[in-house]
């Protein structure tokens, strides 16, 4: 089958971009079509779809660097048949699913997250916008658009049980779970080191400040890696910090990240209501416990490693500790990390996320859906 992969953007390298790469690798394609094309991967090329836009759309796209709001219209303008005659296209990134495909082309969307700002955490963002009438009107319009483009997707893949629940809640659509993969063979275990590790972009929803404050209060070393994001205040605090215990390394290579995971004491991961989050999987694959909060999929993952005991404000499991995400309970978890005997055998909890399983399941879904899709087309023609 001729398969095309379309991902919303490669202007940063986050979890979504890595999954898009693995999607291409799993089905054996060497090209990903995207916006803001930048080459991150040696064996997969990215092609910017801006070349397939009409002149006026190219002009608008170039001047609107932060164009998430306009992205749905950009993707709607793309004529997939001008690129190639695909049997299947897989889209990745919310607004990318606005693509209108030829009638014979199966459209599968890999859903990393519903548009949380307009759905499940809308009220949080509206309070930040001081309950602005314009913001309310805009979000209502985006909800209508989101539901409209949903009908362009034939089948959904989702990254977790939590995302599947939200897809059903807001779109009344069902998705098959296909966990984002890691290459288990790359990760290794070294002795438990003397520092805690935080991995992630500096975004407000990552809730990094409580992690920093907790480590400062407990007088333990914290190493932070990840690109700069929208949380400029926390980033400034880290860069100006004179504390010998806080070290920001910025964006690092995969090799450096894997080495830091192998040699850290534990990983702290504290985002708000994360849909999946690959970092806790990487921590477990490195034989290291991970401190997470009680919201989102990371807490579901840690619960599956086996309950050990509960203390005030925290719950301890074989693979890590669940907190409330505040300074007090993160401090308590840090204290427990030193007291509890962890085992490198927790690596086994990351095995279901290996790329080999991802590849096998993806091919199974695509073959099943393509057969079903073609049969439905034939049935319609015979009516």
Image: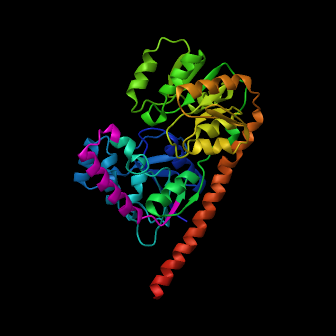
Name the residue: 28% across, 49% down: 136
Q: Nearer the viewer, residue 358 or 293?
A: 293
Q: Position of residue 23 (x, y in %)?
A: 55, 52
Q: Is residue 289 magenta?
A: no
Looking at the image, is 281 positioned above or below residue 359?
above
Q: Which of the 4 image quadrants contains residue 177?
A: bottom right
Read off the magenta span: 127-156
Residue situated furthest front in the rendering: 312
- Image quadrant for the C terminus? bottom left
Q: Where is residue 82 in the image (x, y as percent from the top left)?
A: 37, 62
Residue 150 lies left or right of residue 366; in this view the side is left
Name the residue: 51% across, 12% down: 243
Q: Which of the 4 image quadrants contains residue 76?
A: bottom left
Main secondary structure of the magenta stretch: helix
Q: Is residue 147 magenta?
A: yes
Q: Where is residue 104 in the image (x, y as percent from the top left)?
A: 45, 72
Coloration mode: rainbow
Q: Position of residue 1 (x, y in %)?
A: 55, 65
Residue 256 lies left or right of residue 66; in this view the side is right
Image mark count? 0
């Amino acid at each position: 089958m001729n398969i095309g992969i379309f991902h919303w953007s490669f202007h940063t390298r986050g979890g979504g971009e890595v999954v898009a790469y693995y999607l291409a690798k799993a089905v054996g394609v060497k090209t990903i079509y995207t916006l803001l094309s930048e080459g991150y991967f040696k064996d997969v090329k990215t092609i910017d779809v801006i070349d397939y836009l009409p002149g006026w759309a190219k002009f608008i796209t170039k001047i609107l660097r932060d164009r998430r709001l306009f992205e749905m219209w950009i993707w709607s303008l793309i004529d997939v048949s001008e690129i190639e005659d695909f049997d299947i296209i897989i889209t990745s990134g919310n607004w990318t699913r606005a693509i209108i495909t030829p009638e014979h082309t199966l459209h599968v969307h890999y859903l990393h997250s519903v548009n949380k700002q307009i759905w499940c955490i809308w009220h949080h963002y509206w309070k930040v916008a001081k309950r602005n009438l314009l913001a309310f009107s805009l979000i209502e319009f985006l909800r209508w658009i989101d539901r409209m483009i949903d009908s362009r997707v034939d089948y959904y893949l989702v990254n977790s049980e939590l995302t599947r629940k939200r897809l059903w809640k807001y779109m009344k659509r069902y998705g098959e779970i296909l966990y984002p993969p890691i290459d288990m063979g790359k990760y290794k275990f070294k002795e438990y080191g003397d520092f805690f590790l935080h991995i992630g972009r500096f975004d407000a929803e990552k809730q990094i400040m409580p992690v920093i404050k907790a480590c400062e209060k407990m007088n333990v070393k914290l190493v932070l890696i990840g690109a700069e994001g929208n949380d400029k205040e926390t980033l400034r605090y880290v860069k100006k910090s004179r504390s010998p215990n806080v070290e920001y390394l910025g964006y690092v290579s995969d090799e450096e990240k894997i080495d830091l995971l192998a040699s850290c004491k534990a990983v702290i991961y504290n985002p708000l209501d994360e849909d999946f989050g690959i970092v806790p999987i990487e921590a477990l694959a490195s034989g290291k416990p991970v401190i997470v909060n009680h919201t989102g999929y990371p807490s579901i993952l840690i619960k599956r490693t086996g309950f050990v005991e509960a203390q005030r404000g925290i719950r301890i499991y074989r693979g890590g500790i669940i907190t409330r995400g505040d300074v007090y309970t993160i401090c308590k978890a840090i204290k427990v990390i030193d007291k509890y005997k962890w085992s490198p055998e927790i690596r086994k909890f990351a095995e279901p996320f290996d790329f080999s399983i991802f590849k096998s399941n993806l091919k199974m879904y695509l073959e099943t859906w393509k057969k079903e899709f073609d049969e439905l087309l034939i049935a319609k023609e015979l009516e």
